[in-house]
Image (tube, grey):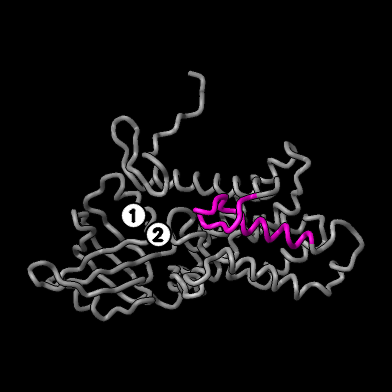
Amino acid sequence: MTVHELTTRLAQGGELIQVSLPCQVVQLRTLRARNGNPYIELEFTDGTASQRVRVWHDHPAYPECRELEEGGFIFLQGVLRRTPWGLSGEELKVRPLTPDEVEELLAGPPDRHVFQEKAYQKVVEFIGKVTDPRLRKLGLSFLEEHGAQFRRAPAAREYHHAYRGGLLEHVAQMLEAASALEPVYPNVNWDLVRVGILFHDSGKLWEHSCGARTLASHSTRVGELLGHIPIGIELVNRLWRDLSHSPEFSLPGEPPAEDVRQHLLHLIASHHGQREFGSPVTPKTPEAWVLHYLDNLDAKLAMLKAAYEETVADLRGIYERRPPLEGRPVEPLPRYRST
């Protein structure tokens, strides 16, 4: 079982759930109930999702849990009970993971590991096929310099693709969608769109901290002070400056390099679509609008998928509200099949 599967089981109405999973301690707090008795609130993750469990002072595992450290790797085994106050641990046992178990956990669930490996190869392939030599060099240099960090970064702290490797999956899906749209809108500069997709959320590599030995992400000071859009713009300007003397930037061809840089920066700056959603400018070119809608579409579909998996539907097929989606998601219409 993964923590994501545990979350799904809880949404489906599970009251008592047997767990046996390796995980990392995200946060450990000692709190007190209304009657004054202490308890531990343990937040744990395996990179697919996170959950919190309460361990009460009279639980046999309480002394062991008190000795845990944030960032530590543990094997959590026992029964979790869903209560009005959250998950409560019963018959819990914890032990440290062995070094081999830690490496296996950091690699992620086998199916997700394979999926993300393929996603990364897709990203490299799409960027490698960009015809503008300056944009292709810029994108491949980013992947060469920051590829490891890009592969483990989340796309968000919550809402969509909010897990280790989520940004990679988000970017790969957007690139696939852009490729499908290219024959329909041949006049769009798809080189610019593809590299814009790669860089539109690149600032999140620094907005959220997700280290090589960490499954959970945390807000960073630079992320709080600037946000991922200014960080992404600064990143592109730095890479562009460093690459400006490369042969690819000296080849004859149009449009001029400075125009390309400005248009790419506009895609990063405008990809949220509206100023109230954090973009300093709104989209002003076809490529900027395409990028905005691809980003919004992929994010919204991911939010709906999570709502269907992690919330409960009533008898009418209406699910619990999941911010920031407006209203309550409704069960989708199945595809037609003959009977």
**Magenta stretch encompasses residue 277:** yes
Marks 1 and 2 in Cβ contact (< 8 Å): yes
Q: Earlier in the sequence, mark 1 or mark 2?
A: 1
The residue at which mark 2 appears reads as 49
Which residue is painted at 47% across and 73% down in the image?
Answer: 220
Q: Is residue 249 left or right of residue 159?
A: right
> Badge 1: few (under 14), some or many (20 or more) residues near its Cα, within 10 Å?
many
- Indicate whether residue 222 is drawn in magenta: no
Q: On the image, which quarter does residue 90 sit in?
A: bottom left
Residue 182 is situated, as x and y percent measured from the top left of the image, at 73, 42
Image location of residue 128, percent across then percent down: 76, 59
Secondary structure under badge 1? helix
Pick out the residue farthest to the top: 339
Q: What separation in Å lies between label 1 and label 2 (alpha carbons)?
A: 9 Å
Q: Nearer the viewer, residue 224 or 67?
A: 224
- Residue 135, image quadrant: bottom right
Up the image or down, 5 lies above or below 317; here it is below
Q: Which residues are magenta?
A: 259-283
Q: Position of residue 36 (x, y in %)?
A: 9, 72
In the picture, the disc for residue 6 is 1
Q: Is residue 114 above or below residue 63?
A: above
Of residues 115 and 157, the one drawn nearer to the viewer in this rendering:
157
Which residue is at the far right? 252
Q: Mark 1 belongs to which amino acid?
A: Leu
In the image, what residue type sits under mark 2? Ala
Q: Residue furthest bottom?
A: 67
- Please name the residue shown 44% across and 73% down the image: 102
